[in-house]
Image (cartoon, rainbow, N blue to C red):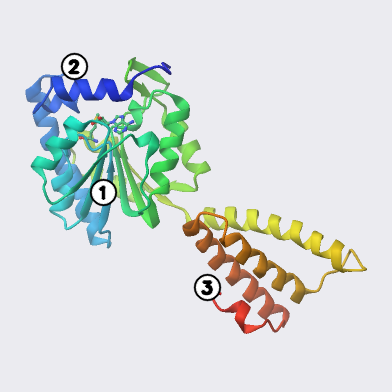
Amino acid sequence: MSENFDQAGYWIKRHEDLKDDPRSVGTLAASREKNEEGERELKIVVSQIAKSLADSGAKSVLDLGCGYGRVTSCFLDNGFEYTGVDISPVAIEAAEKAHPSARFIEGNLSELDLQEKFDVVTVLYVFVHFVDDTLWRSFLSAAIDRLKPGGTLVFADFFPGERTATGQHVVSRPFADYIRAFKEEGVVIDDRLREDVKHTGISCSSHFYFAHLDPQAKVETYQGATLANFEMHRQAVEAKRSGNPLFIGEEEFCIEALKLLDALSEKSDPEKISDLIHLVRMIIVRRAAHEGVDLPSELTADGA
Ligand SMILES: C[S@@+](CC[C@H](N)C(=O)[O-])C[C@H]1O[C@@H](n2cnc3c(N)ncnc32)[C@H](O)[C@@H]1O
């Protein structure tokens, strides 16, 4: 669909034309009164979600495509530190005015430049406005990337049976497209939270889905990538040092692998690589213990 669609231009104009009007972020085809009613219902649903996430220990939320802050108070009232991002300066100005204790950032979600991670990331009626498939996919990945380990992605949208473009600014994709993308990102859908929310009986509650990073999926990805690196490295060490290409001692393997990790840590994304180092260190140290290999303590200490 329209690669030339001017997302920023469209949304800024819509927020300007519909200032103080819930249709600026709601349903254009419905009346203002219907949209006001929809906003009241949405806030009941999001307040329940915020409460249940706060009860399970979540403290920070990143609201991507926050508009004028329709759901900001739902999180603030439940003790969250709230950060909202939107492309429209008009919406951001209104949001800041209404919620001075929250943090709002004007920015394009396709160029999200945030280093922090959050307990909760919300994407409410926003995925559908990424009409270009490549931008949609990379935004989905960027949203997940802002989650802390164990964090929750909350997203709400319309999922038709087939891909549907109902306007220059809307492409609804079937849920299967999301499932496929989430799987690639190591994210799993949480049906328990969804069932809780559906019990409110409010119609928009059925738009809501919840997903978590699956630690096992990440472990498998890390292990796969890392063991492949080790194997290549092992073969190089073997070829260089050993007269017998079929054998490298367990101890030499572990020491070389730990040195390799230390070298890697200087060149890659520090947050990701430090998780990786921690994980692989555990694998190596356990493997060494299992094999009865006595490793030098300066190499086995975490953070070495
Ligand atoms: C349908 S509204 C939903 C707003 C809000 N999530 C809510 O439920 O009240 C979509 C919002 O996404 C914002 N948006 C669309 N594309 C964006 C982009 N590329 N970067 C940042 N914000 C964007 C729009 O400005 C608009 O406020």
The quarter of the rendered structure image containing the N terminus is top left
Please indicate whether residue 82 sits to the left or right of residue 246 in the image.
left
Give amino acid for label 3: Gly
- Helix, strand or loop status at disc 1: helix
Give amino acid for label 1: Asp
Q: Mark 1 points at which residue?
A: 196
What is the C-alpha distance between the residues marked 3 and 1? 41 Å
**At which x and y percent is residue 259?**
66, 69
**At which x and y percent is residue 120?**
31, 51
Q: Name the residue under label 3.
A: 303
Mark 3 / mark 2, whichever is N-terminal = 2
Between 216 and 86, the one lying in front of the other is 86
**At which x and y percent is residue 209?**
33, 41
Nearer the viewer's eye, disc 3 or disc 1?
3
Q: Mark 2 points at which residue?
A: 29
Picture residue at 33% right of the left edge, 15% below the top:
168
Picture residue at 61% right of the left edge, 66% below the top:
262
**Residue 221 vertical position relative to residue 278 in the rendered view, above or below:** above
What is the C-alpha distance between the residues marked 3 and 2? 57 Å
Picture residue at 9% right of the left edge, 30% below the top:
37
Give amino acid for label 2: Ala
Please indicate whether residue 146 sits to the left or right of residue 204 in the image.
right
